[in-house]
Amino acid sequence: MLDDDEPALTPEIIELCRWAAEYYIAPLGEMLRTALPANMSARGRREVVLVAEDPSRTLDSDLPLINELRKRPLPLATIFQEMRVPRSAIDRLRDAGIIAVRDRLQDAKGVRYDRFVVFETAPDLLKGKQLEAVELLQSRGGEMSVRALENAGIGASTLSTLARKEIVRIERRPRRHTLDAFLAGLDPGSISEFRYSAEQRAAIDAVMTSLGTFAPFLIEGVTGSGKTEVYIELMREVVKRGEQALLLVPEISLTPVFAARLKERFGDRIAILHSSLSPSERYDQWWRARRGEVDVAIGPRSALFTPFPRLGLIVVDEEGDGAYKQEETPRYNARDLAVVRAQSRKIPIVLGSATPSLESRENAAKGKYTLIKMLSRVEARPLPDVEVLDLRKEKGEKEDRGFVIFSSTLREALRQTFALGEQAIILINRRGYAPFLLCRECGHEFRCHDCSVTLTVHRREGILLCHYCGFRTRIPAKCPLCSGEVLQPVGFGTEKVEERFRRDFPEVPVEVLDRDSTRKKGELVRILDRFRTQQTQALIGTQMLSKGHHFPNVTLTGVLNADSILGYPDFRSAEKTFYLLTQVAGRAGRGELRGKVMIQTAFPMHYAIQHALRHDYEAFYESEIQFRRTFHYPPVTSMIALVFRGEKLPDVEKAAIESGRRIEEAVAPLAGTRMQGPAPAPLARIKGVWRYHILIRSPHRVSLRRAIETAMLGKKWKGVDVAIDVDPLNML
Ligand code: ADP
Ligand code: ZN
């Protein structure tokens, strides 16, 4: 079967895209493109195929075209422009049923093709190689790749002779891929038979009774409560009913072991849409789902558009994770669209997290979602002890200029952990050596020319690097302003933590897990593997390390700068901090051994930290929703952000101010609507582009969207790009 014979997007997905385009005030075309596998152009080329030859209804002038079409389908453009066939001829031939015009998706960039030989008609009196080829083909069910035939000693000339005699047909097909390379060497962990806990059973039963109807569930389950097993069991039930299941995860490359576990349960009937797939692999996975060759798909936000014909269940794991939001046009949130898809398909949807987003938890409070709580870890394993270390009471080492990397308490705890042969994770939310370089003489700090941020010191590479635009320059020997020769890295990132760790614990094997150390393909899996098999005893990592992993021998997790997020000008900074700390705490003590988490902070009494300390999501939710109510922030209000970007500051300013005026007028009738800005965004410049923003909050969700849409409809400014962000997550 040739893939271009089928329409690429199912009506269900097209409908979903339509809904999303309207809700997110985004162009439908962009939305449709997002729904297709990477690099596949939705616009498509139109082409002409020969359907049935009928000499009685063709003119002599049609013959050159028909002859060409006999060999292969031709793009319409070629027919009009190169062959100079008039449009009227095409219409006539089409009406006569001789040819057909169809949309053909442009070849996805990077997709590899294999040529296949398909046996067609029974030959009479073949000899030698030709006979050999036909017999081989027949013995293999009538189809083989050209390569396989060549390996069997059948050359290209034999094949083309057979093709000319129409004994075989040669087809080009997108290459098929297996997931074996991705999963190679992964141990899915022992899946011993176990009995579901009462909480797991209750969760499974609740969702099971809703199969076949739209029913949204929010599973609020502490880390290690066995949510993943609940998802897997539900997916199995759905597959048993002959339906398909979709599991969305924030970033699957971070959880290859999880993928391996699923693969073990569902065998080859699973599509894994992880981000390190090549375009060719992605394309293949997508089509396998489209053709119903798989029952289960797991992937990041774009996997929401998997064209399953009989979708029976959607699960969104870590539903509060920011990775579900696409931060470029179309700016959709896959978690929210998943609910929309479930509603239109009339199927249940399960949102799960240890730290649900305020949005989802509030929906549960209002009765829109059914709340399922899973409050204890399986097999009554205890949650790790969390201890807060007050940085204000610590004295930093002199060379660290007031910064504390390892407090004395944390250092001692690490020492004890290693002495027992156990493992530790150290979390530091910043890569590189230090976030900036300072001239001790004149106080000059090195900043990016194109972005409003300082350059990060990467000492091993000997460079200053902009983490926003990638600008890099060698670490200078002296200050360009005053020629001072003492240039001091200030603050610390993974690289410096590693340096300090090696000094303090020279005998402990350690590795770093961050974007720099995992740039090489496969390196991420290898680093995690060495840690899991205890070849390394400590792992220093960024946020990449806080999710999903399961290391039974880890008994201590240290968080070095828990405050880094709290300082952001973002109304969600407490939520993000609580989320991060809870995720991190969830990594510790998942095996037989009791775990401990130590959080270094200068704000030990902050409620996000205090509630994380007690693993008390509900208490956090109560405090946080109160804050949102008092200050009219989502989910109590609905928010739309507009970001104006351009290379010339006056242009950007003008566009923002004009829009601000229009919007102010448009929202005036909506009581309780608040507007902040226009003002420079907190990151006022990125990659040489100036940024202004306007934030609008209102209790009237639908009217707000309409007002903004009307105010901005058709508005364009030269050199300024306007992004409308509905339900924004990123406030910078
Ligand atoms: P969560 O997703 O809530 O963090 P998981 O589903 O990953 O939790 O479960 C944590 C660990 O406990 C996994 O290793 C899993 O295989 C195991 N597990 C899950 N359910 C049970 C159970 N009922 N009995 C024993 N072990 C279980
Ligand atoms: Zn920059």
Image (spheres, rainbow, N blue to C red):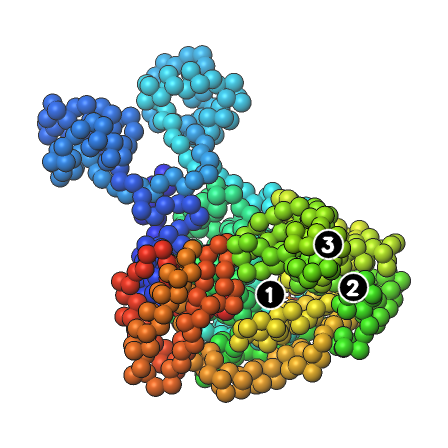
Circles 2 and 1: CB atoms closer than 8 Å? no
Residue 671 appears in the picture as rendered: yes
* Mark 2 or 1, closer to the camera: 2
Give the CA distance from mark 3 to mark 2.
20 Å
* Residue drawn where x is 31% and y is 46% of the image: 43
Secondary structure found at label 3: loop
Asked if 353 appears above or below 6 in the picture, the reply is below
Instruction: Write down which quadrant ligand 1 falls in.
Output: bottom right
In percent of the image, x 14 and y 38: which residue is there?
Answer: 91
Q: How many angstroms separate mark 1 from mark 3 (CA)?
A: 57 Å
Q: Nearer the viewer, residue 337 or 409?
A: 409
The one of 590 and 447 positioned closer to us in this rendering: 447
Q: Earlier in the sequence, mark 2 or mark 1?
A: 1
Which secondary structure, mark 1? helix
Say whether mark 1 is within 8 Å of ligand 1.
yes
User: Label 2 is placed on what type of residue?
Assistant: Asp
* Count of picture labels: 3
Find residue 437 and report its horizontal and vertical position in percent. 69, 57
Label located before the other in sequence (3 or 2): 2
Residue 540 coordinates in the image, percent (x, y): 73, 58
Q: Which mark is residue 484?
A: 3
Q: Residue at x 49, y 84 (%)?
A: 631
* Residue matched to label 2: 400
- Horizontally, residue 203 falls left or right of residue 7, namely right
Mark 1 sits on what residue? Answer: 228
Q: Counting other residues with Cα less than 10 Å from the Cα at mark 1, is it few (<14), some (14-19), or many (20 or more)?
A: some
- Dot 3: few (<14), some (14–19), or many (≥20) neighbours within 10 Å? some
Q: Type of residue at label 3?
A: Gly
Say which amino acid is labelled 1: Thr
Q: Is residue 270 left or right of residue 516?
A: left
